[in-house]
Image (tube, grey):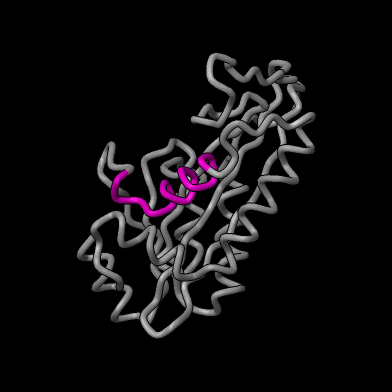
Amino acid sequence: MASGKRVARRLGAWICFIDESGLSLRPARARTWAPRGKTPIVRVAGRGGRRLSVAGLAAYRPGDRTCMLYRLMLHRGRKSEPKGFREEHFAALLDAAHQKLNGPIVVVWDGLPAHKSAKMRAWIASRSWLRVYQLPSYAPELNPTENIWSNLKRSMANLAPGSITDLQRTTKNRLKAMQYKPTLIDGFLAATGLAPP
């Protein structure tokens, strides 16, 4: 991590933390209000196979407003559809981030196979504006993007969407609201214990 911060400072680069998560029609459970002795029952249309994958990027640079980008991928259970993000999807996310942030990028991400594949390494080598550092084997507490997913899922607890498109619409609205709160994204970095770049 420290060498990544030094490289980012030297290049005037953005430090971007990337992670992915998944959501399904089965809502996360949380406490709720109900009359004493009457347990609330929520009916869920959770037919198997349908899920929503989300990839997100939290970008930090001294003197600039913190930024969050994300991509959604809908999986309807068809065999021809990818079940999650692959190399080309992460490449498209990073290209979009480079275009939006308008500067070099230092990426910090986990050891997902799509992050370490030969195809991804070749793509990374072809981008002069990109440096990549990997988090330790299992260290979700060091990735502020994990806190984005935690906040998102907590805000959707006990929500029972009627369809996968309802879930997609709600997820997009909640993430868009987070994008307009840079202090919230700064708080996710502070929660990791890492110092701002």
Q: Residue at x 65, y 34 (%)?
A: 159
Percent of width and height locating residue 75: 71, 31
Task: Examine the structure image and report whether residue 142 is included in the region drawn in magenta.
Answer: yes
* Count of marks overlaid on the render: 0
Percent of width and height locating residue 163: 79, 30
Q: Residue at x 57, y 66 (%)?
A: 97
Figure check: 1 above or below 46 = below
Q: Quadrant of residue 190?
A: bottom left
The furthest residue to the left: 2
Q: Quadrant of the C terminus?
A: bottom left
Percent of width and height locating residue 179: 58, 64
Q: Quadrant of residue 125?
A: bottom left
Percent of width and height locating residue 43: 71, 18
Task: Examine the structure image and report whether residue 67 is included in the region drawn in magenta.
Answer: no
Q: Main secondary structure of the magenta part?
A: helix
Figure check: 135 above or below 59 = above
Please indicate whether residue 40 sits to the left or right of residue 150 in the image.
right
Figure check: 24 above or below 56 = above
Please indicate whether residue 118 sits to the left or right of residue 139 in the image.
right
Q: Which residues are magenta?
A: 141-154
Q: Quadrant of the N terminus?
A: bottom left
For the residue pair 88 and 166, the one nearer the viewer reads as: 166
Q: Quadrant of residue 7?
A: bottom left
Q: Residue at x 29, y 46 (%)?
A: 141
Please indicate whether residue 110 sits to the left or right of residue 45 in the image.
left
For the residue pair 146 and 83, the one nearer the viewer reads as: 146
Please indicate whether residue 67 sits to the left or right of residue 171 in the image.
left
The furthest residue to the front: 36
For the residue pair 142 and 102, the one nearer the viewer reads as: 142
